[in-house]
Amino acid sequence: MQFFKKYAYVYLLVLILVWACSSLVSESVTVVSTAFETPTVPPITVVVDPGHGGEDGGAVSCSGVTESGLNLQIGTRLKDLLLFLGIQTRMTRETDISLHSPGAETISEKKVSDLKNRVQLVQNTEHAILVSIHQNYFTEEKYSGAQVFYAPTPGSTALARTVQNTLRSSLDPLNHREAKESLTVYLMKKITCPGILVECGFLSNVREEQNLRSSAYQKQLACAIAGGMQAYLTQTSDPDPHEREVYE
Ligand SMILES: [Zn+2]
């Protein structure tokens, strides 16, 4: 009996020690996690919008390629990269479709409905940042170079300048185009979140059109845009870009 009593004490002692150690460990884990806790950051969702789609092909390149297809290819690459960087994303379209509502019949009705639905999708996304992907076109062949346009909403100018800089430094140091406010694009005028429209290049320029069709150049473009967005999201300690007015 004495023998069992002795082992019962030892068993009890071991139990107390295990409990004490585990509470110490959990306490120190709490201290460590508190020390490294980042401020509560609202989950930003980047809405990637490949412009046009379906019947609306957008501009047609000098070799006959439609803008809508290139926008989708580049937009999809951008979405994949943003996800890789841990940034939540949402696409306005993932295939070659127009986003018009069923009631729209004529081409112009479909276009208006498509744009309204894109605005709605952005507006219904909490803590959204819009990146619309397009290709430029001009009657003279000589013009080239990516250019970023921004919405008249807080945060958009800073985002556009950052992305314009990464496009310049990683794609074409001789591209001296500056980020510019978008004054006519419906989507840019109607959204209330930060938003940019990236004209990736000119489909009317033979050399640039060839680049824009190549997967290597599309990857570089997506990297530059994603890198610029990542830099924008980390360049200020204020975690909510909706509240930012930096560099405005
Ligand atoms: Zn376009």
Image (spheres, helix red, strand yellow):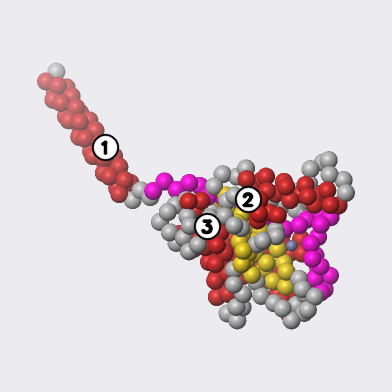
- Estimate the spatial distance between the alpha carbons at disc 1 and disc 2, rounded to whole Å: 52 Å
Q: Is mark 1 within 8 Å of ligand 1?
A: no
Q: Residue furthest front?
A: 183
Q: 193 left or right of 67?
A: left
Which sits in the foreground, 31 or 187? 187
Do the CB atoms of the residues marked 1 and 2 lie less than 8 Å apart? Answer: no
Q: Which residue is mark 3?
A: 155
Crowding around mark 3 (Cα neighbors within 10 Å: few <14, some 14 to 19, many 20+) is: many
Where residue 189 sits: x, y (%)?
Answer: 66, 54
Where is residue 208 shown, x and y percent of the image?
A: 71, 76
The quadrant where residue 236 appears: bottom left
Kindly give the residue lying farthest to the top in the view shown: 1
Which residue is under mark 2? 191
CB contact under 8 Å: marks 2 and 3: no
Verify whether residue 85 appears in magenta. Answer: no
Kind of element beneath mark 3: loop
Q: Is mark 2 within 8 Å of ligand 1?
A: no
Which residue in the structure is indicated by mark 1? 22
The amino acid sitting under disc 1 is Ser
Return the residue nearer the eye: 248 or 111.
Answer: 248
Q: Residue at x 69, y 71 (%)?
A: 201
Name above or below for residue 36 compared with residue 169: above
Q: Start and end of the magenta stretch?
A: 39-66
Q: How far separated are the C-alphas under marks 2 and 3? A: 13 Å
Q: Which of marks 3 and 2 precedes in the sequence?
A: 3
Residue at 64 percent across and 48 percent down: it is 122
